[in-house]
Image: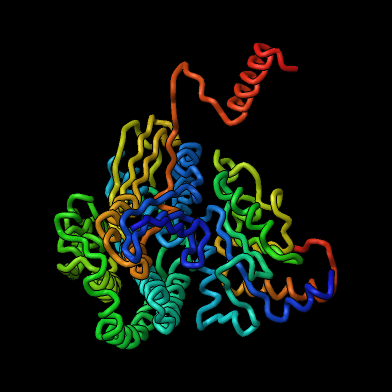
Amino acid sequence: MSMKLKALLKSAWVFHLSTGSCNNCDIEILDCLTPRFDIERFGMLLVGSIKHADVLLITGSGNRKSMERAKRLYEQIPKPCLVVAVGECALSRGMFIHSYNCPVPIDKVIPVDVYIPGCPPKPEAIIAGVVKLIEKVKKGTEKKSSV
Amino acid sequence: MAKTIIPIGPYHPLQEEPEFFILTVEGEKVVDIDVHIGYNHRGIEKLSETKTFDQSTFVIERICGICSTSHPFAYTRAVEDIIPIEVPERAKYIRTIIAEGERIHSHLLWLGLAGHFLGYDTVFMWTWKLREEILDVMEILTGNRNNYAMFKPGGVRRDIKSEDIPVVIKKIDSIVPTLEMLKKAVIDDPVIHARTKGIGVLSKEDAINYCALGPTARASGVARDVRKNSPYGAYDKVEWDMIVTHNGDVFDKLVVRVLEVFESIKIIKNCFLNLPGGEIDANIKDIPPGEGIGHIEAPRGECFHYVRSDGTNRPVRHKVRAPTFMNLPTYKATVIGEDISDATIILAAIDPCYCCTERMTVCNIKRKKIYSGKDLIKLSREKTKILRNKMGVK
């Protein structure tokens, strides 16, 4: 992985993208920012615009309407970037695997670097996942890993 | 003056969930609003029909992360209505405790987000810190922070251990002083008064006409609460008051929610005091053919479920009506005429939950062809071809 990406990770700015989730993962991500977990101490910040982001945090089972938007957003994020899938739905569509509106898992559309399982993953798990992501980049391994 | 359209969403820093607002503005004033949803649609009603009655509870739970008790509660009540069966007393109390715990964390979550929208990030941080304590309580009682999986048709899945009760009561008591402080800080703050009083007023007539539910209606003076009007669970056995205010603006919606948190704490403590012993499950074997309805008071208003059974182990029809579905159209009465800068807090004031509300329309046109984009292009090309042949152009 490039030096540029390594430099970005000193203070990774995160854009949060929900592609048809039940809100739980989204709220747990917001929970990470609040006093008990306080992910900002690792230099991470939730940003409002995709064009400022280094990391794309994806939740949800990826339904027909939102996956088109997700694809467009992925094209807009400055490269190199990292993609983290949070929650069971983002990993494998979880309980919605037989739904008519969730045709493909997210990683068939967007390349995912780190998977964080759980329904919803606890904030501790999200932090652990992000720390593993940073370690992975530092080691320079390019293969996908699971938490 | 020329009209301008301001799009908010579908992916916007303000929102956790994807939804799309189209504000039409004239200068600073909002003249029209339109909402596009569907970014969260997962087809849960259909999915529920492919699962057994027991499995459906878990799918229903994942309609919404914040209302993950309300939906199973209404669903189990609908299934119990088909048989009909009476749930054991202890199960009723446990259900009430879990539902009220959810109400506390949902209202605190909203209060935090409202503070965040107003530019009071201190309120956001404080309330979410308090919310963690409630999530801890829920983790002790149920084993998970959000999706509790406590409900099943006929009772509850897990019992509350007697050694957990003092720990839980102590934890709940420990947040009350901070909550009192927060209540004073929020309700007496002159800036919050200036930002929320008289903003986004929903009159009593409008609230009734739009069929507003829950805190949105109660803030407009409509005393409508399923817990009081048709009691279920243990709500008729414990002492508590319905909070009703009369102005219908954002401030009153805030006050209703803050005061309801205190009522919920009262209900939980009363339930623990009077928790009866005995069975927690009525052991339902078969569900006969028939239909049932279940409605409960979710944090956002009345949540309604309809289940039809044909005697097999799966529901043949399952209908969900979430409270936001009724509250969403009140935007037409509240946002129009306000400033753009106030639009965000008014949109947030009904505590909208889009993943509950998502639904889709199916166009069923019999024996008529529906043209897709590809078909239209094909038609257009064919026409050009015909014209070319006519004109003799090669």
Q: Is residue B287 above or below residue A11?
A: above
Q: Position of residue A29 (x, y in %)?
A: 55, 69
At horizontal 42% and vertical 79% (from top left) the residue drawn is B124
Residue drawn at point x = 38 percent, y = 53 percent: B71
State which quadrant residue B361 falls in. top left
Answer yes or no: is residue B266 visible.
Answer: no
Residue A97 shows in this picture = yes
Residue B138: % across, % down: 43, 70
Q: Identify the residue shown where x is 43% and y is 58%.
A: B6
Q: Residue at x 56, y 80 (%)?
A: A37
Tell me residue A64's x, y (percent): 57, 44
From the viewer's side, name the closer residue of B380 and B169.
B380
Instruction: Looking at the picture, tell me which residue is in the foreground, B339 or A90.
Output: B339
Q: How is the image coloured?
A: rainbow
Horizontally, is A44 left or right of B215 in the view? right
Q: Is residue A111 left or right of residue B25?
A: right
Left-right relation of B286 to A132? left
> Could you tell me which quadrant the C terminus of chain B lies in?
top right
Q: Quadrant of the N terminus of chain B?
A: bottom left
The residue lying toward the viewer, choosing from B316 and B282, is: B316
Q: How many marks?
A: 0
Q: Quadrant of residue B120?
A: bottom left
Residue B122 horizontal/vertical position (percent) = 42, 84
